[in-house]
Amino acid sequence: MEREYDLLVIGTGVAGSDIAWHCRAAGMRVAITDSRDYGGTCALRGCVPKRVLAGAAAAVARIRDLSGRGVPGEVSIDWPQLVAFERTFTDPVPRRKEESFRRAGIHTYHGSARFAGENRVAVGGDTLTARYIAIAAGAHPRPLDVPGADLVTPSDDFFYLEALPGRIVFVGGGYISFEFAHVAARAGSATTILQRDGRVLTGFDPDIVDRLVLASKEIGIDVQVHMPLVSVERTAAGLRVRAGRAGEEKVFDADLVVHGAGRVPAIEGLDLAAGNVETDRRGIAVNEYLQSVSNPAVYVAGDANRASPQLTPVAVRDAHIVVDNILHGNVRTADYSVVPSVVFTTPPAASVGLTEAAAKEKGIPCIVNAGDLSGRFTNRSIGEKHVGYKLLVDGDSRRVLGAHLIGPHVEEVINVFALAIRHDLTVDDLALDAIPWAYPSSVYDIIHMIYPLVRK
């Protein structure tokens, strides 16, 4: 069957949903489709279930850290019960999402979408023609080109394991592996992280990462670097992982091997060439308006954009930019220069703005102030000893250029620094004389981070 629309959206995650709803509210005829359950990565296979698991791990960590400090007793994670609780968040999403589209008058489709022309997309037995097509298809784990790759469990499936195995190997040293490893370790599994080169968590400041690696090792996580995956094979006792450089390979036995080695845009099945949509190995090529450089009818939001940091808030902002540009004619541009990011371990680590290495590479003169806050009573009182910071400040203007943190609540504190960078605030603007931050709080500890930099 052939149908015509003003807009077709591919993907039902946060970006695709926002584009569909806002354009429908503006009076457009809108259709949306997805090859998987409605809801997208964040709601079903990312942020939401991750926060549930990480919250349980943090609760266990906090009680254990306070052992001998007035909180006696043992605590543990009941994995089946935790996953059942997690599913109360995820299971209702597909039905609710699809019902919300239908109530809004958005036509819903299911199945793999494939371009059949610059303005035509085939979904199952239907061919949909649209003036605009928005691609918000999200991402999936990067294919692993090694023997036994089919034995590796996608990170998406970790959320729904019925039982947690005793030995888990995580392939890749990014935030997915670290977050899951911290949950698994707190739940009693022996966990190993294999990183192909010498640095884990490459998007974060190396000094902050060193603190996090130390915290990880202290709870039993074995972090192995220079360990590219070579093969996975099944044995009578479980799985055997071979990793390492040629001639220096090591063997790791496991009950479960989890893919945490990066994600790529989920666009390979769209037949983008048939739609004259230019791509490269990183994703779809777009201009500053998030519009395809080769097909002006196509806009891209979220992970499918080759320049995207692949974070949910970025996808949401992309969606709003795409909506405005579709409705009003390319009036907004995308800017990824100030994007805070967090790894939800225990303790969490966070980053925004320039790193030291990036500042040096760009030739930007700056003052670097780093320190340890584990002695602050706000941290001692909860038994957290891995707390630190590094700030980068422009030597002349005294503007904040970068902030890198580890410790309790840094996922909140980092937003203060993001706001400061976005609005060119100086360290003096963050000082106690300027703002009497709520006390005692983790945000108040900004005062101690910037004290040596503030004008006396």
Image (spheres, rainbow, N blue to C red):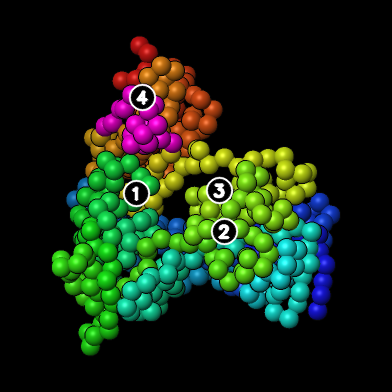
Q: Residue at the location (66% across, 45% down)?
A: 289
Q: Nearer the viewer, residue 102 or 433?
A: 102
Report helix, strand or loop for mark 4. Answer: strand
Of the numbered discs in the image, which one, if any, rests on residue 366? 4
Q: Looking at numbered disc 3 in the image, what kind of residue is underneath it?
A: Val
Residue 352 in the figure: left or right of residue 302: left
Residue 363 magenta-highlighted: yes
Pick whichever of labels 1 and 4 is earlier in the sequence.
Answer: 1
**Is 106 left, or right, of 75 in this rendering?**
right
Per the image, the residue denoted by label 3 is 314
Give SS at disc 1: loop
Q: Counting residues from the N terminus, which is met first, the one under dot 1 or under dot 2?
A: 1
Q: In the rendered structure, are the residues bearing label 3 and label 1 in contact, judged by CB atoms less than 8 Å apart?
A: no
How dense is the environment of label 1, judged by Cα within 10 Å: few (below 14), some, or many (20 and up)? few
Question: What residue is drawn where x is 73% and y is 56%?
Answer: 297
Residue 268: mark: none
Relative to residue 185, is residue 251 depicted above or below? below
* Cα distance in 3D space between marks 3 and 4: 27 Å
Residue 339: image x %, image y %?
Answer: 49, 42
- Could you tell me which quadrant the C terminus lies in? top left
Neighbour class for label 2 at 10 Å: few (<14), some, many (≥20)? many
